[in-house]
Image (cartoon, helix red, strand yellow):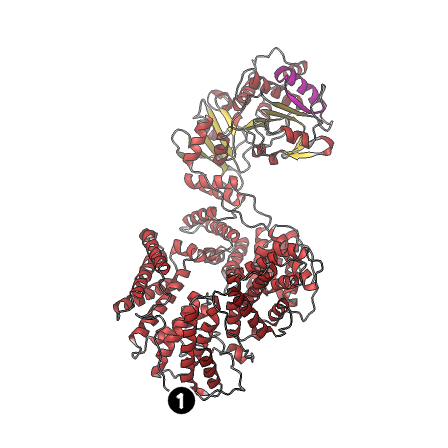
Amino acid sequence: MDETIADLRDALSRLDGPARVPVLVRLGHELTRRYWRAGPGQPAALADLSAAVEAWDAAYRLLDAGDPARGQVAAQLGWLLAARHGAHGGDQQDRDTGLFVLGEALTFTNLPPALAAMARLSRGQLFLGRATEALSPAGARAGFRTGLPPSARTDAAEARRLFQEVLDGPPLSADVVAMTRTMLTIAESIQPLLDGDLARFDLNRIMEAMAAMQRMRHDGMPPMPWVPGDPLDYPVTVMHGEPPAPPRQATPAPASPARAASAPGVGSTQAPATPPPVDAESARGVAPTQTPAPAPPGDPVSARGGARRRLAALAGGPDQPVWEQARALLRAGHTAVAPADLDGFVGAAVHAVDADAGGGPVERGLDRLLSTVGLCLRQRRDGSGWGDGEDDAAFRAPAEHLVAAAGLVPPEHPAAVAVVEAVGGLLDDARPLSGVIDEIADTVSAYAARMPSRPPVVAALADLCHTVAALRDDAAPPPFAVAVPSDHPWHRVLSTAVAHARLAAAVRAGEPIDVDPALGPLAGVLDAVLRDDDAALRAALDAVPGPYPPRTAATLGAVRLKLGDLDAAIAALSPAVRDLDDDGLRGRGWWRLAEAYRRRGAAGDADRSRAAGSTALRCPGADRRRAARFAGWMLAEGRASEAFAALEHAAAAPDEPPDPLARDLLSVLVGVGVAPRAAAAPDVPSPAAVAAAVREIGATALLYLHPTDDARRTAGVLCLDAATDRLDLLANVPLTDPLGADDPALPAVLGRWTSGSLLVAASGGLDRLALAAVRGRDDRRLVQDVVLAHVSSGAEVIDLAGRSFAPVTAAPVFVVNPRGDRDPAMAEVMAVRRLFYPRSACLGRALEPVDGAGTPDDVRGRLPGASVVHLACGLRGTSLQLAGDGSLDAAAVRGAGGLAILTEGWAPALLDAGFAGVVGWQWQVPPQVAALALFMLHLHLVDRGEPPAAAVNAVQRWMLDPARDLPPFLTAGHLHTIATTDLTSPTLWAALAYRGR
């Protein structure tokens, strides 16, 4: 067969014009037969398939539009393009050209029935594949909400028609009939998804169809058994012409013509008379290369040898080490290699990796280096795969092979330089800091760091990887420079990377940027945003040419929102957010769209705003501020369920990084942001789950209190009743300070509870509102009837329900005056310890022996297992000020439990360390008042055995009562405080607060 193919190619070299057609048809048949024998879908067979495509394509182009043979040639060409697209991951060009030529073939009435069936089935598969692309993550986000573009539904309908015509036509093999019925079922089953009508979607039916397809494949069904009989007896186009002349021994067999370079556009309604030219590379003067035969399948050693023989033929220098040949080929680029030769090398290299010929880690690593080089070159030839919002999956395979090569080739081996230099083939020329490099940056930089010597290009690529990792982790990118010669293939892309890194560093630091014209008009928009210059911003926006890809449109829509151009913002954001793959930007886009609708306030905008905000809650990367604002909107509208979800989301979401608009613009400019990747959307518990936890704790209800306007003039009160699991929006009330005013609205809401315990989740700056001091009926304060405990959310209630308190006397710990700046606390702690906790541990400085100096290690070692921790030390946030200028973030300590008591400050985040409750101060009170209150707290905890929330309530009521009883063991200092201080003032007793179960 190889000799026949060589003879046919030699004959072609001596023919011109239409005289070539019969020989091209015979060559196409022989190459197709060889492809079939090698095995459809096998990487090593790709070169034969590409050569067959080129032969049939050349014949097709030499036939006039009215030539009766053109239909049969078009059918053969389209079938092979469909095979390359489906079985070998061919690009969109193969699919679109295949659709065109198969459609043309079916217009010919002289097409043999079997060939016509093959053309219909191939065309139907291509239409079905294009329709299902609309169900990708980006497409599905749009389609499931609003229905997908009409083109997707048209493609699915056309696939159904073609499959039905195959079934209604002449008899075919049983396998083909079964496969066609299965594909028809799939095409019918996805129609509800394409229509956006999920009610009609039958998941079981499509799963059964997919399972049937898998069973047919498992039972050995050939991939393309078009007609009964031997699979090699595929339809043959018979053409008569002069036999080829005898071969001339002195003429080497040339490579096949280059594969197609362009095709009709997707969804085009106007098909050209013929597809666009195929010989793009030949037109640029690419020299043909002698291509060795592929390695026999199943022979690992031959597979490796075949790949390296192909490499030597393409790169030259067969005496050089294989890694030097790989570097030479990569540096030469895809334009220096004929398409069929590159396809053959890629197939052989991937086949060598799959065959795994052994031979030690270096040899296996070199196999993967060769596959990396080949896959990179092929992808650069067929299209980068990058672009605004595009998936870079095409470069993930070579990136994975490169990482594998780095794991097999030692960094001290001479081939290590080629491994690192291959990173350049993965870089996007326009946005080198983005794409798949983000996934391998850590591996490459660590590998390069272990190399004993690093050439300039290796050092520059390692620095680029450091920069990518720093930007991903929201760290300052390290400076790096282009240290390679100007004629090096990677000089330009590294220069772009340096410029982008400097721009990212400036934006991260909030510094002015240099508007480089090379960065494009978006740099002017970014500069105006950073300078907060609205006039310049409008001018810069007008200079950005459209149409805009989704990421650009979403970001420019945010700029329009900033300027108050609400119609323009909505017009840009509404379609863009549905097509975004960037999780963080998609979430911010939905929030911005919700705000734009709400601010515009046209008919229907309230519903649109609510829908957009609800969608944003489900997106990764949502932030606390926006979720809290949306919760206020929902409370104002009386939407209890939406308000509950937003409040729970806000409590769990992180704060947004500063100036997200500038960072989003930077991301569009350079392809990478300067903030951590968007975290997954928080899990929001159901009201029923929260109500069950409220019951477990023993409370009557959970009240959410949150502002309903940005100025915090009003607040909504949302109640989750523990007995009924019901959510009720009780009221939107004017906000007044209970310490200074007695507005009747809030007492009217809270007055419905006259006993029991309430959990309060106050947010939006209301967490320090003195609710205990609210004055209700009969001039009674709320604290006199109800026990209050603060929480952050229902999710925290669920967490607290799983914690418990040990008896406070079991393992008490006191941390007192470790820095020597709180001497009065030593006497207070001594009295409390002697009266209530004689077996307690004491860390720091005291008037009696201590168990440690109060260093961070001392405290860290005592927190786990402590029943109560009394902190008479400095507190900055959640950081304890300890001995020797040491500090300890108590919230970061895991394994703590029991109750934390603060002599100053308010640190509810201590619950993150595992405490079940925290007693503290919502605002500062005189030290002697705090000491008295905490003395009484310990009395109620120990002598009266009350739980923490009830003990805090008892202390507050004792201070509020002018006729209070005085315990007999109060110190003289405490008696003096009682005698000289009006403890009934809510500014004193209401400052004491409890958070926890």
Q: What's the residue at 44%, 27% (across, down)?
A: 700
Instruction: Kindly tell me whether residue 362 is visible in this rendering.
Output: yes
Estimate the x, y position of residue 911 in percent, counting from the top left: 56, 32
233, 942: nearer the viewer: 233
Left or right: residue 245 compared with residue 881: left
Left or right: residue 152 compared with residue 885: left
Q: What's the residue at 43%, 51% (across, down)?
A: 602
Q: Is residue 833 magenta?
A: yes
Estimate the x, y position of residue 377 in percent, counting from the top left: 55, 68
Circle 1 residue: 242
Residue that lies at the very extreme toward the top in this rendered image: 968
Estimate the x, y position of residue 413 in percent, counting from the top left: 66, 61
Q: Is residue 907 magenta?
A: no
Q: Quadrant of the N terminus?
A: bottom left
Instruction: Kindly tell me whether residue 384 is visible in this rendering.
Output: no
Left or right: residue 110 compared with residue 318: left
In the image, the segment drawn in magenta is 822-845
Above or below, 477 relative to 982: below
Query: Is disc 1 surrounded by few (<14), some (14 to 19) or many (20+) residues within 10 Å?
Result: few
Residue type at mark 1 is Glu
Could you tell me which secondary element the residue under label 1 belongs to?
Answer: loop
684, 788: nearer the viewer: 684
448, 798: nearer the viewer: 448
Estimate the x, y position of residue 478 in percent, counting from the top left: 68, 55
Left or right: residue 778 compared with residue 324: left
Q: How many numbered marks are there? A: 1
